[in-house]
Image (cartoon, rainbow, N blue to C red):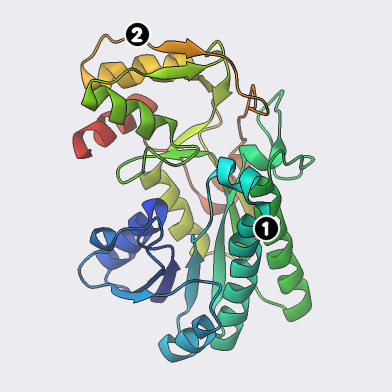
Amino acid sequence: MRAIVTGGAGFIGSHVADALLARGDDVHVVDNLWSGRRENVGAGAELHELDVRDEALVELTRDVEPEVVFHLAAQSDVGTSVERPAFDADVNVVGTVRTLEAAQAAGARVLFSSTGGAIYGECERPAREDDERLPLSPYAASKLAGEEFLAMWNRLHGTSHTTLRLGNVYGPRQLPKLEGGVVAIFLDRLRAGRETEIFGDGEQTRDFVYVGDVVAAFLAAAERPAGLYNVASGTGTSVLELHRLCTAAAGSEQEPRFSPARPGDLIHSVLDPGRAERELGWRLETTLPDGLAKTWAAT
């Protein structure tokens, strides 16, 4: 198929683009290269250096005539969203609306990358798609607003756009400077021989999912009608256990330094992937130890 991948020079987007290229699809990457890297764009993909908020996106989409737009361009740093909420909303809300306008001009579907843990808030059990949404940051609120725009668009225009709520995605090409990239931070510091740091007691849990499994979910969703899906492992891993697994992957015995817990950090965040398993036929294929080993080898 012919596809546009917004944010296709970034972490998850570049892996989606690579998977499409591997199938022989016609791939166009839209990225302003703010956090994306030109070298992440695979041979065969056409890079359009463009911000998703730009009106030119509509004209580009008319010219390319994609069947699917994978929308992964985002402001994804929680700290930045707290410091600059208007900027966060501009990129994540206005950029998503512009993407919807562009897709409509071409008659294309949109597959939207959203966030799971940040939207659900504190979880006493694995969160399901119909659970209450309790965003705790401007980033989470802007992603939820993007979801609502997709749902409204489907009702208003009869489109079949899909949202995927992702767990804590990790893997090659993730930048250690971005919020949510705790795996990238740990591995980067271990490789450099620098001290690793855990905020709080390390017993807080997260749901880690390898980027290759996330890509598989996007490709599966592209073949199905509109939906809303959690894409995660369904299993909570403590930050302390994650650190142990990272040191094992790095062949290190380094112990972390503990710092005071950060205000607003979730204690437990785990997603229930049951709907994706039932309706998309998607299954987590990569265990956390195996995914960390792959990530370390590729770093």
Where's residue 41, x and y in %? 27, 64
Q: Is residue 14 left or right of residue 240?
A: left
Which label is found at residue 86? 1
Residue at x 43%, y 30% (from the top left corner): 182
Crowd rating for badge 2 (residues with CA inside 10 Å; few <14, some 14–19, many 20+): few
The quadrant of the rendering that contains the N terminus is bottom left
Residue 27 visible (yes or no): no
Q: Is residue 187 left or right of residue 122?
A: left
* Res 146 quadrant in image: bottom right
Q: Is residue 287 left or right of residue 120?
A: left
For mark 1, give the secondary structure: helix
> Residue type at mark 1?
Ala
Q: Which residue is mark 2?
A: 255
Residue at x 65%, y 43% (from the top left corner): 82
246 in relation to 156, above or below: above
Which label is found at residue 75? none
174 in relation to 241, above or below: below
Most foreground residue, 153 or 234: 153
For mark 2, give the secondary structure: loop
Residue 297 visible (yes or no): yes
Q: CA distance from mark 1 to mark 2?
A: 39 Å
Residue at x 34%, y 63% (from the top left corner): 17
Where's residue 250, x and y in %? 23, 21
> Residue type at mark 2?
Glu
Q: Is residue 219 left or right of residue 236?
A: left
Most foreground residue, 77 or 118: 77
Crowd rating for badge 1 (residues with CA inside 10 Å; few <14, some 14–19, many 20+): few
